[in-house]
Amino acid sequence: MAQFWKPGTEKPRLLEDEDGGVIFLSSSYSSSSSGYGYVSIEKQRQRLPVYKYRTAILYLVESHATTIVVGETGSGKTTQIPQFLKEAGWADGGRVIACTQPRRLAVQAVASRVAEEMGVKLGEEVGYTIRFEDISNPDLTRIKFLTDGVLLREMMEDPLLTKYSVIMVDEAHERSISTDIVLGLLKKIQKRRPELRLIISSATIEAKSMSNFFLSSKRRQALEGEELRPGLEPAILSLEGRGFNVQIYYVEDPVRDYVQAAVSTVLLINDKEPPGDILVFLTGQDDIDAAIKLLTEEARSNGKNSSGLIILPLYSGLTRAEQDLIFSPTPKGKRKVVISTNIAETSLTLEGIVYVVDSGFSKQRFYNPISDIENLVVAPISKASARQRAGRAGRLRPGKCYRLYTEEYFLNEMSVQGIPEIQRSNLVSCVIQLKALGIDNILGFDWPASPSPESMIRALEVLYSLGVLDDDAKLTSPVGFQVAEIPLEPMIAKMILSSNELGCSDEIITIAAVLSIQSIWFSAWGAQKELDEAKLRFAAAEGDHVTFLNIYKGFLRSGKSSKWCHKNFINYHAMKKVMEIREQLKRIALRLGIVLKSCETDMQLVRKAVTAGFFANACRLEAYSHGGMYKTIRGSQEVYIHPSSVLFRVNPKCVIYHSLVSTDRQYMRNVISIDPSWLTEVAPHFYQQQRHNPTIH
Ligand code: CDP
Ligand code: MG
């Protein structure tokens, strides 16, 4: 191992544990289960660093409108603070304590953990809500976990969020787009509801800027001569770091294939290092599945030592049972290897991790307002993220972190902080949500970090072309209000509304449901050929959207059989989710007065409805090079059909894509062929020479 790995020269930032094993559960931690086995849940709670601060937190919340809590991942912020508040009476009198998370999986995981700690049934006193899944009860739920996106939706019904006494905006350092919008809006709500309490919690780093954000409003108010209420200035509480020392190792030379490198590193650790679980950071389902396959194969051919490996993926979209495996204790004599996206960076704490393998990458959204292209890109993480990842190894005892990049790269090339998502996203959804909440002056909105004016103009222009905003950049009636009410991206919402006029709402709602989950295919695990053959059985000449309809029909015809799914490489859980989402969309559609109607075999109507929503993503075939080179009609950007699409190598003249992913090239995912003449029909403003520029307010 010494040949390949070089210990880092920088002193690890993580603090030594100060009072010796506060959270050290058992001396032989190798079997990470035994610790918990002997310790009651109440004892476990008391051992968390946050426990010492219980009184301080309750005092600050009582006396300050906003409290910022900073503490290492795993110190108990998310699971304990809502319980402290509840115990102190903040949920009395029918009030509710809210705790938001940027990630859906984290919402589910922490809610079930808190319900377990409180000994209550999930969905009653402790509940959660994520999009398309509401496990809460308006009469019973006192502590509610929800995504920040769902909290935004709730503001449409109840702009002052009156049922909540305290709102904890968790994981604020992640700076997700919804977190930023929520923070800006909560600041406004606080002025109208001085009794509302905010807790902003974060796993380090951004605390200062967060506090400045809330401070600046104070200053502004002072300038405007408004009298300052006591406690308006946010309180900051820093929970002492409790991490153990983590020794960092770097590769000596840059690695070419981080999946392969991660797998070799896991095997090396397993060979040479004492017991303790391993956490590997990769970027998404695709490379995680690839790593699992490789690791399983290599471990098998490697023989002796690898039988003790329990290899588990961790990414959004896992089923409940799969999630439980992640959190269940490692059996004696075994070693867990969790291969995760950056969800394990701060959102979820896994017990028992002693070794971290950090690829140095994560999947990030990037938007270029000039080319009007938004991409999901595998991009280098920041130093702040790298430190967080390393910290995951030092929770229970001193750990080791293996970085699959060189020290020189870390020191000289990695950026210090990530860029807030709002500054690298398409703002179409964000703008419509603010408009629906009555925020007209979007550029003048009090953002924790301002989005670029170019992105804002692009978003306004697309919304204008969708018929969602009028000349004064106000929501149109009824289309604008209807689109805002559908909890999906505005382009999908518009596609659904158009399908009503075209008479294909039954089909389009199915398509919308499929597009809102990650993938309905089962990961190939080395069976790419079989997967491709299965796809061919459903492939429609029109493209992926129509293919989804064929799959959906097949699934229904099979009696929703899991066997049928298995045979056809379709993910049964994903299909069940599609059915659920479809039911919910049906209810929303009915509420909006959309009558469910099938167009039977007339797929032209389906394609037209897709065009009505996604015209901005239209591309024209330019050349047959590299299997078919397309250019976006509006921005002339080079794009290619993704190999997973049924239209790969079919190359229709004109297509519309649902999303782009970027690796060596920009690839279009979920593609449908269209007739270019439809574009000027559905979006004349967008595609005519002299484009209308909507006014910006
Ligand atoms: O929010 P923060 O990172 O500060 O900590 P937390 O998520 O509240 O985690 C506190 C403790 O609860 C950790 O020891 C976690 O391992 C444990 N936990 C768990 O066992 N299962 C979960 N689903 C969530 C947390
Ligand atoms: Mg947390």
Image (cartoon, grey):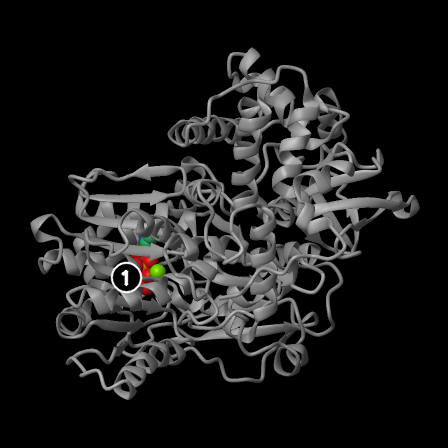
Q: Nearer the viewer, residue 608 or 326?
A: 608
Q: Residue at x 57, y 36 (%)?
A: 495
Image location of residue 576, percent across then percent down: 48, 26
Across and down, in percent, residue 86 comes to: 14, 55
Residue 365, horizontal then vertical, whole percent: 59, 59
Compared to 88, does 468 lie above or below? above
Instruction: Mark 1: give few (<14), some (14-19) or many (20+) Cα within 10 Å.
Output: many
- Tell me the residue at 50%/69% (across/down): 390
Does residue 276 appear in the picture of this structure? no
- Pick whichever, 294 or 542, lies toward us: 542
Q: Position of residue 691 (x, y in %)?
A: 69, 57
Q: Nearer the viewer, residue 65 or 473?
A: 473
Q: On the image, numbered disc 1 is attached to which residue?
A: 168
Instruction: Please name the amino acid that badge 1 sits on.
Output: Met
Q: Nearer the viewer, residue 427 or 342?
A: 427
Q: In the picture, which quadrant includes the N terminus?
A: bottom right
In which image quadrant can residue 62 be found?
A: bottom left
- Please tell me in which quarter of the rendered image ligand 2 is found: bottom left
